[in-house]
Amino acid sequence: MSQSNENIAPSVVMAVAKELRKLTNEPLEGIKVLLNEEDITNIVADIAGPVATPFHSGTFKVKLVLPSDYPASPPKGYFLTKIYHPNISKAGEICVNTLKRDWKQDVGVGHVLQVVRCLLINPFPESALNEEAGKLFMEDYDQYFKKAAMMTEVHARVAGAAGAAGTSATGEGGPVEKRQKPIETKEAEKRRQEKKKSIKRL
């Protein structure tokens, strides 16, 4: 067991490990926990982009880091997959009240992951970490949707369930893109290259 686990009360470690095993065996909708019992203080999960959002074609890797005084203090949340969203900074930090002023000690890991997924459905642009995304969301939603969808296509797109299952637990953006190499027509390849060129300017 890692030193990080030793900084948290043994009873808390056992409770979190039990919840993570349950989440692995009984997955929540759109959420796949990648269990690592050697270090339960760094929780990694794949979150499927919800339908009717610019993220629906992608799978996003998220990490929750438990502090030494958990659950007295909330975990810190990060998106390891690049995403264009008002409440997620360019560095991946997540801004949501559940992980800040509204934190309660009885809130479990599963609920936190559900809140993060719901944030993809209902952003809060008034408390934006990505000010550009927040402003665009409020002033020109269609353009925001288009830009967020383009980011999803480039960084989070998976080729079916097999692609999601092959996700690396490293949490780096590279493996997310490398794991999917579907056969494409010349026209599709051309569109993909154009999107990659466009995203460099984002």
Image (cartoon, helix red, strand yellow):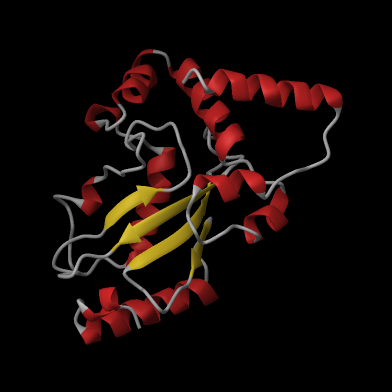
Left or right of 179? Residue 173 is: left
Q: Name which residue lies at 49% across and 50% down.
A: 172
Left or right of 144? Residue 71 is: left
Res 29 visible: no
**Is 131 drawn above or below residue 5 in the view shown?**
above
Q: Is 188 or 109 nearer to us in this picture?
A: 188
**Is 65 drawn above or below residue 138 in the view shown?**
below
Instruction: State which quadrant residue 193 falls in.
Output: top right
Q: Name which residue lies at 68% across and 53% down.
A: 163
Q: Name which residue lies at 24% across and 52% down.
A: 98
| The N terminus sits in image quarter | bottom left
Left or right of 199? Residue 136 is: left
Res 199 visible: yes
Q: Position of residue 125 (x, y in %)?
A: 29, 28
Q: Is 187 or 148 nearer to us in this picture?
A: 187
Q: In the image as oriented, which residue stretches furthest toward the right?
A: 185
Q: Position of residue 118 (x, y in %)?
A: 40, 46
**Is 90 drawn above or below residue 71 in the view shown?**
above
**Number of marks present in the image shown:** 0
Q: Name which residue lies at 24% across and 81% down.
A: 6
Q: Is 169 or 76 nearer to us in this picture?
A: 169
Q: Is 54 or 39 nearer to us in this picture?
A: 39
Q: Position of residue 115 (x, y in %)?
A: 35, 52
Q: Position of residue 121 (x, y in %)?
A: 43, 39
Left or right of 117? Residue 103 is: left
